[in-house]
Image: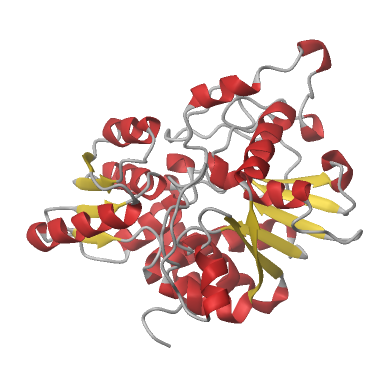
Amino acid sequence: MSSLDIARADIEGALRRLDAQQRQLLRRTPLMKLSGREFGLDCAEVWLKLEQLQLGGSFKARGMLNRMLANEIPGSGVIIASGGNAGIAAAAAAQALGLPCEVFVPLLASQAKRDRLRQLGASVVVTGAAYSEALEACLMRQRVSGALLLHAYDQLEVVAGAATLAAEIEAAAGLPDSVLVSVGGGGLIGGVAAWFEHRVRVVALEPALAPTLFNARAAGHPVDVSVSGVAADSLGAKRIGEIAWNVSQRYVTDALLLSDEAIRAAQRWLWTELKLAVEPAAALGLAALQSGAYRTQSDERVCLILCGANLDPASLAAYGHPDPGNSHPGPQGCHPGPQGCHPGLDPGSRAMPPLDCGSSPQ
């Protein structure tokens, strides 16, 4: 196996490292299990892995922390290029560990994400029209500073850390029949597919305006793509990562494209019906179900990963507020708040109140 591939032993090592050393810096995020009928779908169950409740507001916390704990870190700290989520995760972990952190973000990174990075104590450099240009500037700076380089999606420790999410799903509820995974550079799908292997149907989902894996599969190898659209700040890599490409060749069943309109509609539904505030990248799974891009079987248990919540809260204003007299109380009797299942929960905070959302014990 090359350094740009991942084995189950790497994931098991990440699980041990994170559990033994710094579990207080991560959350075992809830798994919400709902009937397909609640989504208007002809399937047995829809599972929602609420990873938007993770520290830093996204699954990226897992890989960033695993990368830091697995390596000796110089006095200059850590450095990363990111559309926002990986940088926020790196900054949160660095702050907790008392390390300097420098984050390069492209111009398309939202102001909300830039502000959050600065709140976490990171030095923020805004440069380049897209992630690839921010990465180039980051690499130049790293050669001078000697800081430990963190890659948003294409390092072994990063992908293995992301895979711990899939291990939690299995530990909480066993195996779903299928799991739908949003793809940018591929760190998440690389980890999820490496854990589930052939035991679960793994489906890649991408915005039609950022088709990194879809185009790579068509060409037979990774290729550069143009990136734009509603999810470009978090799914804005212009080429699929090598690790994700290698893993997907073995374990990913399908790669599907979704329109910006379908993604926005799913994001709106999650907010208005379940009060789950997620960024567009986290809505691709529901978009695939609602649009018919992915068609479930009547007995299927399909798992969606709500991978991030680092959105500008003002963007929810366009969706309005449900009439209190007709509002949905939330699945399983849960009364969700803006950041998930409890009002006022800051995704960047360390406090984690008990969650009672009908999810399986974790």
Question: Residue at the spot x=68%, y=17% of the render?
Answer: 321
Relative to the observer, which residue lies in front, 209 or 346?
209
Relative to the observer, which residue lies in front, 204 or 349?
204
Side of 38 where 10 appears, left or right: left
Numbered-mark total:
0
Q: Quadrant of residue 154?
A: bottom left
Question: Residue at the spot x=61%, y=27% of the render?
Answer: 342
For residue 48, above or below residue 197: above
Its colouring scheme is secondary structure
Q: Position of residue 283 (x, y in %)?
A: 63, 44
Question: Residue at the spot x=67%, y=51% of the render?
Answer: 285
Can you see residue 298?
A: yes
The quarter of the picture where the N terminus appears is bottom left
Side of 48 where 100 appears, left or right: left
Q: Position of residue 352 (x, y in %)?
A: 52, 35
Question: Residue at the spot x=47%, y=32% of the render?
Answer: 351
Q: Position of residue 16 (x, y in %)?
A: 46, 66
Q: Quadrant of residue 254?
A: bottom right
Side of 251 where 126 appears, left or right: left
Q: Position of residue 135 (x, y in %)?
A: 27, 57
Relative to the observer, which residue lies in front, 317 or 85?
317
Q: Residue furthest left?
A: 144
Side of 124 where 27 appears, left or right: right
Can you see residue 99?
A: no
Q: Residue furthest bottom?
A: 1
For residue 286, above or below residue 74: above
